[in-house]
Image (spheres, rainbow, N blue to C red):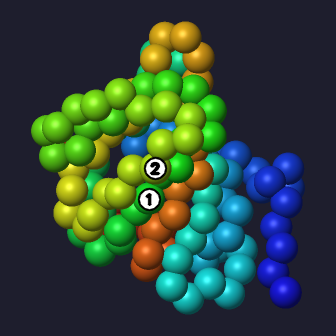
Amino acid sequence: MEIRSRDAAIPFTTDDGSTIRSLLDLSNAPVANHSLAEATIEAGEATVRHHHRVSEEIYYLVEGTGTMELDGETTTVAAGDAVLIPPGAWHQITASADGPVRLLCTCSPPWASDDTYFS
């Protein structure tokens, strides 16, 4: 049985600028087909626009509001929203000035930094 505590996950900043806590991924569990992380984007901040050639992602917002851009289409997102990000789709999320955005991010296959490409 693999169980990881959020509080035991040491946060780090990814190349896209979000603060990540890896909950279950290739670095800490014998995952084969997907990964799970918590990401935080501080108030008024945004990730760097990027895409993943291989991984499909799903964002599930658990706190805050912001703007989600996916292949040039922009919409407001809030806690309770789930966003599908297909492989190859350029994307960026921006937290509103009111507070941070905190989201769960799943990737299949598991997230890998070498599958993150910037414009």
Q: Which residue is mark 1?
A: 58
Which of the two discs, 1 and 2, sits closer to the camera? 2
Query: Is residue 24 visible from the viewing direction of this image?
Result: yes
Residue 37 figure quarter: bottom right
Q: Are marks 1 and 2 in contact (CB under 8 Å)?
A: yes
Distance between the alpha carbons at the discs numbered 1 and 2: 7 Å
Of 103 and 25, which appears nearest the observer? 103
The residue at the point 21 percent across, 50 percent down is 90
The image shows residue 113 at horizontal and vertical percentages of: 43, 63
- The residue lying furthest to the left in this view is 72
- Is residue 29 toward the left or the right of residue 114 in the image? right
Q: Is residue 19 visible?
A: no
The answer to whether 82 is drawn above or below residue 107 in the figure is above
Position of 68 with respect to 82 (left or right) is left
Left-right relation of 1 to 82: right
Question: Which residue occupies 39% across, 50% down?
Answer: 83
Question: Which residue shows up at 46% across the image and 50% down it?
Answer: 82
Question: Which kind of residue does numbered mark 1 sit on?
Answer: Ile
Which of the two discs, 1 and 2, labels the residue nearer the N terminus? 1
In the figure, is residue 3 to the left or right of 103?
right
